[in-house]
Amino acid sequence: MGNMTDTMTGQEWCDAYGVTFDWTADGYQRDERDGWEYHAYTITLRKPLDDQPALHHGVDFAWRQGLGIDDDPTADRVLWAVGQDVAYGALDWDDFAREFGYDEHDAKLSEYRSWEACRELHAKIYDFCASQEMFEWFCELREDGDES
């Protein structure tokens, strides 16, 4: 990624680009397909427009946490994981399938839907970011506590 020699946590990325991180709890949910129980959230990222600082540009996306996680969502915990999905969203279907060990010609519909969700998230975050550099940093966020 060019001259990037280090990575940032989610909160460091927010601070560097003037992004606010917020969330709304959408309640307890249970996945009908596999029975997974989780807390659902809507994550909201906002930043001032460069040419009109009083106005804000934003993006919302879904986030789920298993019932074993009692803490509220944080930029550090959420954004590095979302960054991974966003990076996978840049792959075409064949590359995505190979990356996860799927047969690209005989994959389950749910596997294909996972790729579609990553591509949609990739587009949302790309559109939100004010520059290519901001987007690239997002895709390289490190997990909080990972000092590599």
Image (cartoon, rainbow, N blue to C red):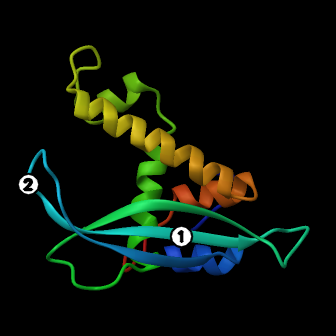
Residue at label 2? 35
Furthest residue in direction left, as rendered: 35
Label 2 is placed on what type of residue? Gly
Determine the residue positioned at 85% across, 68% down.
Answer: 50
- Of callouts 2 and 1, the N-terminal one: 2
| Rendered image quadrant of residue 19 | bottom right
Whether residue 52 sits left or right of residue 6 in the image: it is right
Determine the residue positioned at 53% across, 80% down.
Answer: 11
Furthest residue in direction top, as rendered: 105
Separation of residues labelled 2 and 1 (CA atoms) = 27 Å
| Rendered image quadrant of residue 29 | bottom left
Instruction: Indicate the position of residue 49 as horizontal and vertical percent values.
Output: 81, 68
**Can you say whether 87 is above or below 94 in the image?**
below
User: Which secondary structure, mark 2?
Assistant: loop
Label 1 is placed on what type of residue? Thr
Instruction: Indicate the position of residue 71 as horizontal and vertical percent values.
Output: 28, 85
Determine the residue positioned at 46% across, 27% down.
Answer: 92
Instruction: Indicate the position of residue 17 as horizontal and vertical percent values.
Output: 70, 73
Furthest residue in direction bottom, as rendered: 71
Residue at label 1? 44
